[in-house]
Amino acid sequence: MRALRALLAVFALAGGASAARAWSPETNYRLHCEGCHLESGAATPGKVPALAASVARFLRVPEGRAYLVRVPGVANAALGDADLAALLEWTLRRFDAADLPPDFAPYSAEEVHRWRAAPLVDVTAERVRLLEAIGGVR
């Protein structure tokens, strides 16, 4: 499995962002996110917050939707806007479907394009501000 992932990563990098569009959101997660967020969406203590059972809570506040796109690892991913929108939706449903708001609408390529143009500089400060607005960490 590790060899397959490495081969897929090399192939995606060789073809640039346009080649990445050929992959499913799950494969894009493995290629672009899993190195830090792990297969299970768990935290890397002291470095990377968990996605599992926590990522959808940011959708409770209007700024949270943009935050999920503006995090540098997301905003700078070597994916087109539509692929990134699909990856965000897949990630939310895979790791925190129970906490999705009832009116959740999938990300559009247009909003991803707009928000990723302004990646966050101080991710920690914005995360803390949003968590305070949401009501803290659960």
Image (tube, rainbow, N blue to C red):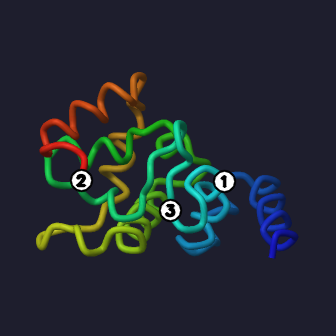
Q: CA distance from mark 1 to mark 3?
A: 10 Å
Question: Closer to the observer: label 2 or label 3?
Answer: 2
Q: Residue at x 82, y 54 (%)?
A: 14
Marks 1,3: beta carbons within 8 A: no
Q: Residue at x 28, y 60 (%)?
A: 56
Q: Is residue 24 above or below residue 55?
A: below
Task: Please indicate whether residue 136 sits to the left or right of residue 47 in the image.
Answer: left
For the residue labelled by badge 1, is the local secondary structure a helix, a strand or a loop? helix
Q: Which mark is residue 35?
A: 1
Q: Which residue is mark 2?
A: 138
For the residue labelled by badge 3, is the local secondary structure a helix, a strand or a loop? loop
Marks 2,3: beta carbons within 8 A: no
In percent of width and height, residue 124 lies at 38, 29
Of the numbered discs 2 and 3, the one sitting upstream in the chain is 3
In percent of width and height, residue 62 lies at 14, 46
Q: Residue at x 34, y 56 (%)?
A: 55
Q: Residue at x 43, y 39 (%)?
A: 71
In percent of width and height, residue 129 lies at 22, 31
Q: Is residue 46 above or below residue 87?
A: above
Say which quarter of the image contains residue 134: top left
Of the numbered discs 1 and 3, the one sitting upstream in the chain is 1
Q: Which mark is residue 41?
A: 3
| Amino acid type shown at disc 3 | Gly
Q: CA distance from mark 2 to mark 1?
A: 25 Å
Q: CA distance from mark 2 to mark 3?
A: 16 Å
For the residue labelled by badge 2, is the local secondary structure a helix, a strand or a loop? loop
